[in-house]
Amino acid sequence: MMANFIMVYTSMTGNTKAMADGLAEGIRKAGYDVRMEESDDFDAKELENYDGILVGTYTWGGGELPDEMLDFYEDLENVNLSGKKAIVFGSFDSIYGDNGIAVDIMMEQLKKQGAELIYEGFKIELDPDPDELENCRILGKWFAETVDTLVK
């Protein structure tokens, strides 16, 4: 049986969405499907039905989770992610001095719920350039193939 994947993300300016799309392209290029959902109307409990979990968030203000991600973040408290493989990604703007702290906050929450992060925090400043988008595709393909190997 092939591994299954879910991506939950939020994006305000489109930067994190561009990353999400690139990662999804890579997963599909590897021959897998990925369900994509925006965080503000997603039930975190559904993550338990997937082998590979990708969470994307931009960093808001001086280093906070954006409002659209808060309910999802809090709902994760009641989710068992043991045995799940995960990756967290997101965009940030260093002008605020945060360097993508929301990605780190979300990584800690997923780890606390038992997920294994098989790649530590993939961050891109502002909108991804063509090389960074290619890196998203490469990472998505690698993630899909790695998760599939680990869950067999």
Image (cartoon, rainbow, N blue to C red):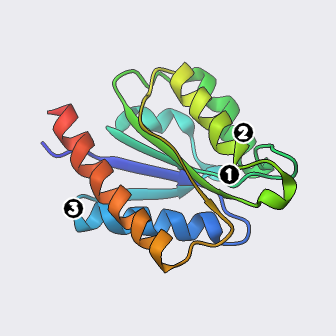
Q: Residue at x 76, y 61 (%)?
A: 93
Q: Residue at x 70, y 43 (%)?
A: 102
Q: Earlier in the sequence, mark 2 or mark 1?
A: 1
Determine which residue is flagged by label 3.
30
Mark 3: few/some/many CA within 10 Å (<14, 14-19, 20+)? some
Q: Earlier in the sequence, mark 3 or mark 2?
A: 3
Q: Name the kind of residue labelled 1 in the image.
A: Asp
Q: Residue 103, image x and y in percent?
A: 63, 43
Q: Residue at x 48, y 79 (%)?
A: 130
Are dots 3 and 1 in contact, CB under 8 Å?
no
* Vertical relation: 99 (above or below) 12: above
Q: Residue at x 64, y 69 (%)?
A: 15
Determine which residue is flagged by label 2.
71
**Residue 40's mark?**
1
- Residues under labels 3 and 2: Cα distance? 32 Å
- Residues under labels 3 and 1: Cα distance? 28 Å
* Vertical relation: 74 (above or below) 144: above
Mark 1: few/some/many CA within 10 Å (<14, 14-19, 20+)? some
* Vertical relation: 27 (above or below) 144: below
Are dots 2 and 1 in contact, CB under 8 Å?
yes
Q: Nearer the viewer, mark 3 or mark 2?
A: 3
Left or right position of 30 against 6 = left
Mark 2: few/some/many CA within 10 Å (<14, 14-19, 20+)? some
